[in-house]
Amino acid sequence: MGQEFRFILPTPPQTERFATHQLAYEFRREREQREDWRDYCAWYAETAQKHQTELKKMRRDINLFGWFVRGH
C-alpha cells in the first residue's frame, strides 16, 4: 500500500532541503565570525591597556639615551 501512494504524495524538492542546509551553515558561520571578532576586540583592548601602562612607566624612567645624545 505504501508504493501505491508514493506517486500521490510528492516528495519535497531538493532545493528546499539545500536551502535549509545553506541557511543553517551561513548562520553558524556568521556566529563564529562574530565570536572571533568579539575575542579579537577583547584581546586588542587588553593589549592596548598593557601598552598604555608600559608607556606611562617608560615616561617616568630616566632618559639615558638623551644624556648620550646631548653629550656630543
Image (tube, rainbow, N blue to C red):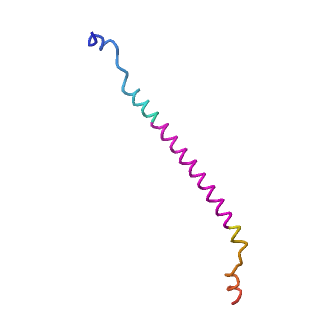
Q: Taking 32 as reference, is 7 above or below it?
A: above
Count of marks overlaid on the render: 0
Q: Nearer the viewer, residue 38 or 21?
A: 38
The answer to if 29 sits in the magenta stretch is yes
The answer to if 38 sits in the magenta stretch is yes
- Give the main secondary structure of the magenta stretch: helix
Q: Residue at x 34, y 14 (%)?
A: 9
Residue 60 sits in which quadrant? bottom right
- Residue 40: x and y, percent? 56, 52
Residue 61 sits in which quadrant? bottom right
Q: Taking 23 as reference, is 49 above or below it?
A: below
The single residue placed furthest to the right in the displayed view is 60
- Split into 4 quadrants, where in the image is the C terminus? bottom right
- Split into 4 quadrants, where in the image is the N terminus? top left
Q: Taking 63 as reference, is 2 above or below it?
A: above
Q: Give the range drawn in magenta.
A: 25-54
- Residue 21: x and y, percent? 42, 32
Q: Residue at x 71, y 67 (%)?
A: 56
Q: Residue at x 68, y 81 (%)?
A: 64
Q: Which residue is drawn at 43% across and 34% down?
A: 22
Residue 16 sits in which quadrant? top left
- Residue 25: x and y, percent? 45, 37
Q: In this view, does 19 lie to the left or right of 72?
A: left
